Image: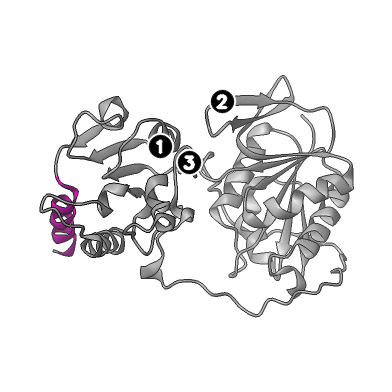
Amino acid sequence: MESILVLAHTEADGTLAKAALEALAAALALGGELTVGLVGAAVQPAADQIAGCGAMRFLAVEGEAFAQPRYATDAAAAEALCRAAGAAIVIAPETSRWARALPGVALRLGGRVDTHATGIAATNGVPAVTRWFYRQRMEAVLTRSERPWIMLLDAGCVTPWAGVAGSAVVERLAAEAPATRTQVAGTRSPKADEQTIRPDAKLLFVAGAGWTKKQSDGAVHAGDAESLILGFLRASQASLGGSKSLVDLGGEGEAVLRFMTHLNQIGQTGSTPRHRKGLSTCCHGEEPHVVGWRFITERRAVNLDANCGWARGKADVVYVADAFEVMRHLNGLLSA
């Protein structure tokens, strides 16, 4: 098997996130000689965290200039690590940071890159990447002769490495940060109870356009829908998804859920989440859910129409009931 380099950037506390540990596990499964390359303000905690992984070398580009995600500095650090390692295969987690920088690094090195890999394996010593095309409808297995070959692994596809920590010897490279015109002034993020997208949540709650339509009394209750959904998300710490019809309502002058954006969209033209469980409410249609929910392990739905395309054969359990009443009851149970 060819030599392998795992690229990872550290988090704010200097450790590695789950996605990086998944990339490490995928690299170890290939069986080649392993080198780990780390980027961040201080990398020793990350190196110690995975000291027991069996890597031959730990390389690092370290410094405050490499703490923040920025194309110029990330690309320079990754290029230095790839050249120092001399590995034929480079595996990195599909984070926004690496997805932005590594395609350019592949060009600088004269190699190739494949993004959104969902599996990495080797047959008779030949590595191959598995990924989906055409909105998750077709699965392909790719091999390449060009080297270095950079692979970006999607999160949630591999069981993360969970070995023993220790004390690692890190070789720090003298990589000079290129001149940049951007300065990171700080980070703004919503409060914890206002965050609706939680990739690591065990439950995905999906709201459909039915929440904003006329209810049994002939009136629209968008305000009640907002309070019920937000109350459930805060109590359960679930992640929120939305159907395309719901997130598009804002441009049509219809009643909307104010916290719902296109970032929450899942399905045929949205994201394909990988939560353990999923609960769909007020959703209709078949194809968007087949595509968007195919990696959800347990799928349940709440719908007044037992014959809708989503309910028939696509959900493991269907509750034929009014979603407003179901969520009021659920919130009462959670609050108790």
- The answer to whether residue 201 of the structure is visible from this angle is no
Quadrant housing residue 148 = top right
Q: In the rendered view, would you say 126 is above or below 300?
A: above
Q: In the rendered view, would you say 154 is above or below 259?
A: above
Sequence-wise first label, 2 or 3 = 2
Q: Is residue 333 highlighted in magenta?
A: yes
Q: In the rendered view, would you say 86 is above or below 336?
A: above
Quadrant housing residue 185 = bottom right
**Which residue does the numbered mark 1 point to in the structure image?**
293
Asked whether, in this view, residue 213 is left or right of residue 197, the answer is: left
**Which residue does the numbered mark 3 point to in the structure image?**
272
Instruction: Point out the residue furthest to the front here.
Output: 253
Residue 264's tag is none
Locate residue 256, reporting x and y percent. Answer: 34, 59
Q: Which residue is located at x 76 percent, y 61 percent?
A: 71
Looking at the image, what colour scheme do you see? one colour
**Which residue does the numbered mark 2 point to in the structure image?**
138
What amino acid is at disc 3? Answer: Thr
User: Where does the C terminus fall, quadrant-wise?
Assistant: bottom left
- The answer to whether residue 192 of the structure is visible from this angle is yes
Q: Where are the magenta residues, as a range?
A: 322-335
